Image: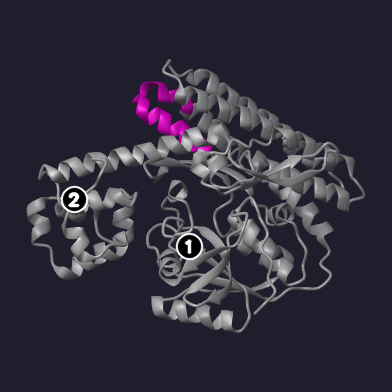
């Protein structure tokens, strides 16, 4: 890449952070240049973020309608899915799926709830309820 | 306190090692660290899923830079992981109190100084802790242009995240760095090894063969759900650009390494040519990324054939670089 082609698109997905990319200057010397983002990268990052937001939104609705336990929403809220939650807790996926059932989750023991709380970075009290979200 | 100076790098692991070695008097650029540890590669592993997407990587497995810098440069490094969170916290404080700068592995998601748009569950991030300020740590995160502050709570959570590639609080720092390292033989050996690894045909998931198989997988997306196809294509570009590769999935960084290597060998023309070729390959990867971004945004049908062919062409151009590298004689 030529030094003048280094994108400076001020990507929203970059926040104010600059990323270093390597490009060659007018004398052909390759250097480390700070870039404020590239539209192409922003498009694909946005796609992934929107997908996560959509999952979290769908989960919110299912929990609100009483079809799923709050745990289901909290998992998506911290950008996890069943696979990552299973890996983070050491629980089998099928046992987590059981905890997604509102009735089962209500009777969950404190020890198990603590492990979820630790993995999800939330308190056990937070896990038990569906928080109020402005953008439902 | 130590007189550590932050520098901005493209990638976390090569960046930490470069900063760490420089602090201890061994001046190696990030591309040089990357090349000396043979960190370039390509992997497409359809049966390993991350966030529902198959694993795509433009470099060797995480921690291989830390491993190979010891093996290839005879740098003695101390690596410590911890069975308890408390021990891991105390040990970091202890090392900082001794004035050391300490490398660490962490999750990206739990680091509070990352903007929300960049926070994903990836456990093999690397950073350098260089001081403590009250209850905060001063961190040199190579992919950030400035040094950052992080609370004890956030750093601890990130260091002890569980799951795939769980960091287990990993801390690392050099014990002994040899003086007067002769880089030439290491470079010569690495260039040959890397070229051969990439050209090797019998490992279907890695090297150029891996690129070809990814190109074939793109063709099959035609039959998949459109949303999945878009996320699949997007994931390739995220691995190529977003995660901090210096652009074009580390190819620009490797071109920079080849250029530095050429200079060390009295401006060797074969290596300089290989560097130029790799830069051009990088540009092709950027075109590939642009094609995908356009396809993902457009409401029209995606031309999977064209995207797949583009990637196939890149693998052919890249093969030429490795053949050129094999022509090099020290």
Query: Where, by quadrant of the figure, is residue B274 drawn?
Result: top right
- From the image, tell me which residue sits under label 1: B106
> Against B153, is A97 above or below?
above
List the single residue furthest toward the right: B266
> Against B99, is B168 above or below?
above
Q: Is residue A128 left or right of residue B13?
A: left
Toward the viewer: B267 or B21? Answer: B21
Q: Nearer the viewer, mark 2 or mark 1?
A: 1
> Mark 2 and mark 1: span between their CA atoms?
28 Å
Look at the image and say whether residue B189 sits in the magenta stretch: no
Is residue A29 among the parts visible in the rendering? yes
> Against B25, is A66 above or below?
above
Q: Which residues are magenta?
A: B218-237
Which residue corresponds to the image point at 33% horizontal and 57% vertical from the top-left?
A87
Look at the image and say whether residue B228 sits in the magenta stretch: yes
Q: Which mark is residue A97?
A: 2
Q: Secondary structure at mark 1?
A: strand
* Chain of the residue under label 1: B
Query: Where, by quadrant of the figure, is residue A30 drawn?
Result: top right
x, y percent for residue A35: 64, 42
Q: Are marks 2 and 1 on the same chain?
A: no
Colour theme? one colour
């Amino acid at each position: 890449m030529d030094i003048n082609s280094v994108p400076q698109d001020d990507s929203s997905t970059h926040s104010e952070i600059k990323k270093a990319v390597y490009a060659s200057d007018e004398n052909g010397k390759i250097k480390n240049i700070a870039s404020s983002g590239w539209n192409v990268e922003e498009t694909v990052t946005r796609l992934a973020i929107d997908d996560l937001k959509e999952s979290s939104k769908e989960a919110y609705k299912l929990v609100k309608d009483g079809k799923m336990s709050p745990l289901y929403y909290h998992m998506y809220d911290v950008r996890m899915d069943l696979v990552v939650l299973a890996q983070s807790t050491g629980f089998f996926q099928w046992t987590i799926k059981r905890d997604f059932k509102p009735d089962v989750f209500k009777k969950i023991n404190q020890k198990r709830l603590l492990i979820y709380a630790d993995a999800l970075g939330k308190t056990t009290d937070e896990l038990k309820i569906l928080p109020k979200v402005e953008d439902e | 306190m130590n007189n550590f100076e932050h520098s901005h790098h493209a990638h976390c692991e090569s960046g930490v090692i470069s900063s760490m070695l420089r602090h201890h008097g061994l001046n190696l650029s990030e591309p040089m660290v990357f090349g000396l540890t043979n960190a370039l590669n390509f992997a497409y592993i359809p049966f390993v899923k991350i966030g529902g997407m198959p694993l795509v990587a433009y470099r060797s497995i995480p921690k291989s830079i830390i491993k190979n810098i010891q093996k290839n440069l005879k740098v003695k490094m101390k690596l410590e992981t911890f069975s308890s969170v408390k021990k891991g916290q105390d040990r970091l404080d202890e090392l900082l109190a001794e004035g050391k700068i300490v490398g660490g592995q962490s999750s990206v998601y739990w680091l509070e100084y990352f903007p929300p748009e960049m926070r994903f569950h990836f456990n093999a991030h690397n950073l350098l802790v260089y001081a403590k300020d009250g209850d905060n740590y001063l961190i040199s995160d190579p992919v950030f242009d400035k040094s950052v502050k992080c609370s004890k709570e956030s750093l601890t959570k990130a260091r002890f995240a569980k799951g795939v590639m769980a960091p287990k609080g990993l801390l690392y720092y050099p014990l002994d760095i040899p003086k007067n390292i002769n880089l030439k033989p290491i470079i010569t050996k690495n260039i040959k090894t890397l070229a051969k690894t990439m050209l090797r045909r019998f490992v279907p998931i890695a090297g150029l063969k891996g690129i070809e198989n990814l190109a074939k997988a793109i063709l099959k997306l035609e039959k998949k759900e459109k949303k999945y196809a878009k996320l699949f294509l997007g994931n390739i570009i995220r691995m190529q650009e977003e995660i901090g590769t210096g652009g074009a999935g580390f190819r620009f960084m490797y071109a920079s390494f080849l250029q530095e290597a050429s200079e060390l060998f009295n401006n060797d023309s074969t290596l300089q040519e290989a560097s130029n070729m790799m830069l051009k390959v990088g540009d092709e990867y950027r075109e590939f990324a642009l094609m995908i971004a356009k396809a993902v945004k457009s409401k029209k049908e995606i031309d999977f054939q064209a995207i797949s062919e583009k990637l196939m062409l890149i693998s052919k151009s890249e093969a030429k670089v490795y053949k050129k590298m094999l022509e090099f004689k020290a």
